Image (tube, rainbow, N blue to C red):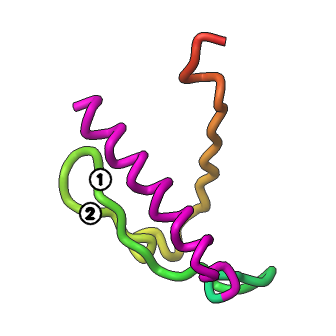
C-alpha cells in the first residue's frame, strides 16, 4: 500500500514538472475569479474522485506541512 502511494505521488510530481517544463504553464494559468478546470483523481478507497462532484458544496482547504512526513 505505501509503495503504491509513493509511486503515485512521484508520478504526479514528475507529470506536473513535465507539464510546466514543456511550457504548459501559460495554458493552465488561471486568473482570480476563474472557474477551476474539472479533473479526476484516483481515490485511496478505489474508484475516482471528480472536482465536479463537489460543485455547489462547501469549500475544502487542503494543507500540506512538509515536515509532517520527516524526522525533522
**Label 2 neighbourhood size at 10 Å, few (<14), some (14-19), many (20+)?**
few
Residue 40 located within the stretch drawn in magenta: no
**Magenta residues, start to end:** 1-26
Secondary structure mostly seen in magenta is: helix
Name the residue: 46% across, 69% down: 54
SS class, disc 2: strand
Q: Position of residue 36 (x, y in %)?
A: 60, 79
Name the residue: 36% across, 38% down: 6
Residue at which label 1 appears: 43
Residue extending farthest to the left is 46
- The answer to whether residue 58 is above or below residue 64 is below
| Pick the front one: 43 or 23 | 23
SS class, disc 1: loop
Q: Are marks 2 and 1 in contact (CB under 8 Å)?
A: yes
Residue at which label 2 appears: 48
- How many discs appear? 2
Image quarter in which the C terminus is found: top right
Residue extending farthest to the top is 71
Q: Position of residue 28 (x, y in %)?
A: 62, 82
Q: Position of residue 44 (x, y in %)?
A: 28, 45
Residue extending farthest to the front is 22
| Pick the front one: 60 or 29 | 29
Image quadrant assignment for residue 68: top right
**Label whose residue precedes the other's in the sequence (2 or 1):** 1
Residue 12 located within the stretch drawn in magenta: yes
How far is the residue under mark 2 from the one under mark 1?
Answer: 5 Å
Image quarter in which the N terminus is found: top left
Amino acid at each position: 500500500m505505501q509503495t503504491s502511494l509513493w509511486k503515485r505521488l512521484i508520478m504526479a510530481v514528475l507529470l506536473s514538472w513535465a507539464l510546466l517544463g514543456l511550457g504548459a504553464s501559460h495554458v493552465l494559468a488561471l486568473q482570480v475569479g476563474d472557474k477551476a478546470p474539472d479533473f479526476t483523481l484516483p481515490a485511496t478507497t478505489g474508484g475516482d474522485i471528480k472536482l465536479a462532484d463537489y460543485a455547489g458544496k462547501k469549500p475544502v482547504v487542503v494543507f500540506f506541512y512538509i515536515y509532517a512526513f520527516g524526522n525533522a
